[in-house]
Image: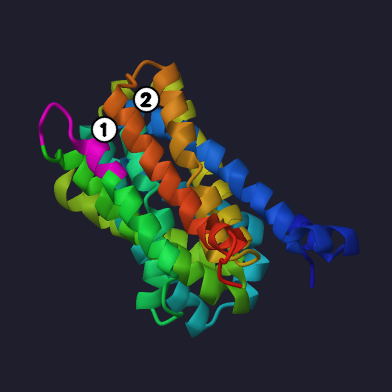
Amino acid sequence: MGHSAADASASRPGMRGLLASPGFNKLLIVACALAWGFSFFVMKDVTAQFPVFWLLLVRFGVSSVVMLAVFWRRIRENLSAPVVRTGVLLGAFYGVAYVLQTYGIVYTTPGKNAFLTGVYCVLVPLCSWLLGHGAPRRMSVIAALVSLVGAGLVVLDNGLPLNVGDALTLAGSVFYALEMVVVAHEGRGRDVWALTFWQFVTIAAIVGVGHALVEAAPAAEAFTAGNVCALAFLAIVCSFGCLAVLNYALTKVDPTSGSLLSSLESPSGVAFSVAFGYETLTPRLLAGFALIFAGIILSEVGERLVAALPGGRR
């Protein structure tokens, strides 16, 4: 039976060792995070031109087709009820998260959307506990509280307690956390490329139904060269490329560590947002962002810092 180029590369001993290396997979996660950071800026522009469900249908419809073309042998060879079931569950979590985040960015700034989405990092240990994978570390709970205080500062715009875009984004971060826990624990024993294909198909089905029920097709004049390029970037790079690679990398690293690195999309999203004039860094926003980032760091290295102190736990 023939194999794809990806299969052939993975079969070489040196490449196989590199693809299994936690360090290399952490670099892959960081690369995905940087691409997603830029995508917050791109999404803010295209959501002004295209309906949300239609936009996500294009992203994940195209991703499904590309995934099938590249990995069709792996998908066929791993066609089983457990793989399909897990892929559908991942797609349900991720689909709901994407819808909430994308609607959220319509009503808030790209930078705030990026940082509030990054809260999933400190939610991963809690969601892992809720799904039966062990109680969260004490430092993880402290980190979550620190990040929530920071999120409160970020969303307190002009005295308003919470705007709808911020609330939708935070809700989406919960579903991102659930998806990361499931792929980290279930993906280790199954073919991650097949799982990701069924995940894409499920997301496309969810948003396709939403588009059919509540949206009209976008106007023809919206399809400028720039908008078409943006759609291609979101579908090929951010969905097919980054999500498939992230799913693979999460099966090779600790899920808490992986979620921390993935959440670097948040500060990179703010950097792009500031650079393109969507964001002004006020002292309140800076303080909120600093606390969110501190919570992210605590969730990963806090226990080791405590243990390193004189009299710390060994």
Q: Quadrant location of the C terminus?
A: bottom right
> Within 10 Å of the Cα at label 1, are there few (<14), some (14-19), or many (20+) other Cα atoms?
few
Residue that numbered label 2 is attached to: 223
Q: Position of residue 311 (x, y in %)?
A: 57, 66
Residue with the most extreme front position: 311
Residue 202 tag number: none
Name the residue rendered at 84%, 65% in the picture.
11
Residue 205 in sight = no
User: What amino acid type is highlighted by mark number 2?
Assistant: Phe
| 24 vs 199, nearest the viewer | 24
Front residue of 276/296: it is 296
Residue beneath label 1, please?
218
Residue range corresponding to the magenta coloring: 150-160
Taking the magenta stretch, the answer to whether it contains residue 159 is yes
Q: Is residue 213 above or below residue 150?
A: below
Instruction: Look at the picture and state if 30 lies above or below 136.
Output: above
SS at mark 2? loop
Q: Which residue occupies 39% across, 76% down?
A: 129
